[in-house]
Amino acid sequence: MANDDLTAADRERFARARARGAMRARDASAVVAARYDAGDGRLLRAQAYERRGAVWSDLVLVDRDDLLSRLRLRRRVYAGAVDPDLPGDFSVRGRLRLHEGNGRDVVTLGTAPNGRDELGVPIF
């Protein structure tokens, strides 16, 4: 099937499948919720699941320093949500990125808006 024959829905389905495949990699984490500082918008802690071999961990709390160290080590950290229909599977929004500069590290799901952390997940 050529790319021209694919509908928009097919392309989206294939993109999700590729993202799920990336989530199966070793040393992956899936952040599902976050808490930010009200004053400066810095991430305080996040709720995440960690990949441990063939299975995912229970929900763990990850503080800002731990998340930054994982990103600096180029570990795969994704923003997503738990798929309620299939335990152990996630709806992936994208890979989190670390932006360094101006004396401050910013964690985002895309570009750094106003120098604030933005993971694209619900607030807890």
Image: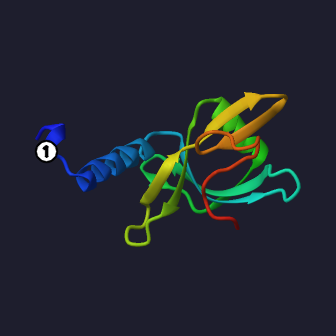
Q: Which residue is mark 1?
A: 5
Please give the name of the residue rendered at 18% of the width and 39% of the height, measured from the top-left corner. 3
Residue nearer the viewer, 86 or 99: 99
Residue drawn at 88 percent across, 55 percent down: 39
Q: Position of residue 94 (x, y in %)?
A: 50, 46
Q: Position of residue 93 (x, y in %)?
A: 49, 52
Q: From this view, report whether residue 49 is shown above or below residue 25.
A: below
Residue nearer the viewer, 6 or 61: 6
Which of these two is toward me, 74 or 94? 94
For the residue pair 19 and 60, the one nearer the viewer reads as 19
**How dense is the environment of label 1, judged by Cα within 10 Å: few (below 14), some, or many (20 and up)?**
few
At horizontal 29% and vertical 53% (from top left) the residue drawn is 13
Place residue 47 in its image quadrant.
Answer: bottom right
| Residue found at the very far left of the displayed protein | 1
Q: Position of residue 112 (x, y in %)?
A: 68, 40
Q: Secondary structure at mark 1?
A: helix
Q: Which residue appears farthest toward the bottom when viewing the image?
A: 85
In the rendered structure, the answer to whether residue 33 lies left or right of residue 80 reads right
Question: Which quarter of the image is occupied by the N terminus?
Answer: top left
Label 1 sits on what residue type? Answer: Asp
Query: 104 left or right of 29?
Result: right
Residue 89: x, y in percent? 42, 60
Picture mark count: 1
**Which residue is most to the right?**
39
